[in-house]
Image (spheres, grey):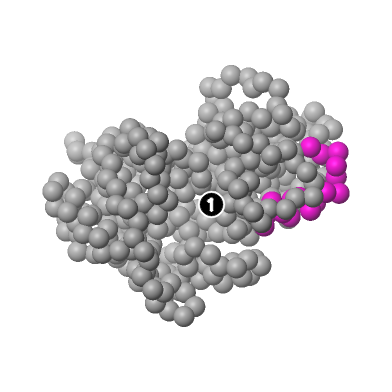
Amino acid sequence: MSTAPRVLLVAPMHSHPPDQGNAARLAAFGAQLRARGAWVELLYYGLEGLDPHREAAMRQAWDGFHHLPAQPHAPQRFPGFWGLDDWCPAALCRQVAALHARQPYQAVVVNYVWLSRVLEGLPNTRRVIDTHDLFGGRHQVARRDGLEPSWYFTSPAEEARGLARADLVLGIQAAESAELRRRTAVPVLTVGHPPGLGFLHAAPAAAPLARFGLLASGNPWNLRSAQALDAALATAPELDWLLAGGILRQPALRLRSHPRRLAVASAAAFYAAVDCVLNPMQGGTGLKVKTVEALGFGAPVLGTKDAFAGLAAEHPAHQAADAAALLPFMRRFAAEPGFRHELALASRRLALRYAAEVDRQYDTLMALLEG
């Protein structure tokens, strides 16, 4: 019988509270490994800072918690994009090496290819990159979607150099895994985001505050998508909706449809406040964790094709062309009890299918880490 592995996760984002997509991914990833018997520690490279509340939550969540305060980025190596290691300080590499030397890990899992430098020189461990997203050419994708590039982006060649440092690369959805296989000879495994399926045990919700709602962080793709939805809903004042999440803190947010703005302490509070969840995502890459989260809460979800990327959605209301194309579905949801039941059933069936798929993916990953 094999011994469950000791695993170190290295991440530049907090895991708890899981109040944004990448944090939810990190928290769920570790929880899935722990549920399968792994000892899982987190080294948080504090790009988002660390307050006492977050620190206490993360210390409670993990088998071990380590922290390195953020350091200034290196100067951008290339004129049009960041170099692979510009955001990964040598101090982080030294700390990972010291932790591994003190008590070796069977696996070190780095979140994002731009922290892959920490995998260099680590002996006798399985080196894994959880990519979350494609960063090679990300700035070009942003410009294609009409956005100014932000955060980290690099070239495909630099990204490939980072991927080559791993023994195993994880893609968050099948289409991105296929692209990663074109960029590297390292084995690639798709590992999605578990939807949670809280609706299997939830009590009936109280009366909602609004028929429709959008929960979003303040990243540029979310901001652009929310503004497109707002433009569409400005022509449909009979459709009430609310907006929640970090997007409300964006000074560039200008809305003409006057949604209710709701400050919520948790995702659960948002899902209890609406009958139907909207995701008008336009463009972007990766898996839309907020879509998966909404499905896991059992919410009927209306969304664009981009919002359901990687989820094998079948219902037309999960495949709208853009934000404006959501309006006919919203009108049907508001007016037709039969359509409300149909959408709820389609959303929950998708959640169950996807949960089973992701469960198998984590079983495969765990077998590789134990091997």
Q: Position of residue 257 (x, y in %)?
A: 80, 46
Residue 362 among magenta residues: no
Magenta stretch, residue numbers: 224-240
Q: Can residue 158 be spotted in the picture?
A: no
Residue situated furthest bottom in the rendering = 79
Which residue is painted at 27% across and 36% down in the image? 63
Q: Which image quarter: residue 225?
A: bottom right
User: Which residue carries the number 1 mark?
Assistant: 287
Q: Position of residue 124 (x, y in %)?
A: 17, 55
Q: Position of residue 92 (x, y in %)?
A: 27, 58
Which residue is painted at 60% across and 48% down in the image? 249
Q: Amino acid at mark 1?
A: Leu
Packing grade of label 1 (10 A; few <14, some 14-19, many >=20) is many
Q: Which image quarter: residue 360?
A: top left
- In screen coordinates, is 36 left or right of 4? right
Which residue is painted at 64% across and 22% down in the image? 205
Please name whichever residue, 217 or 4, is drawn nearer the observer in this view of the structure. 217
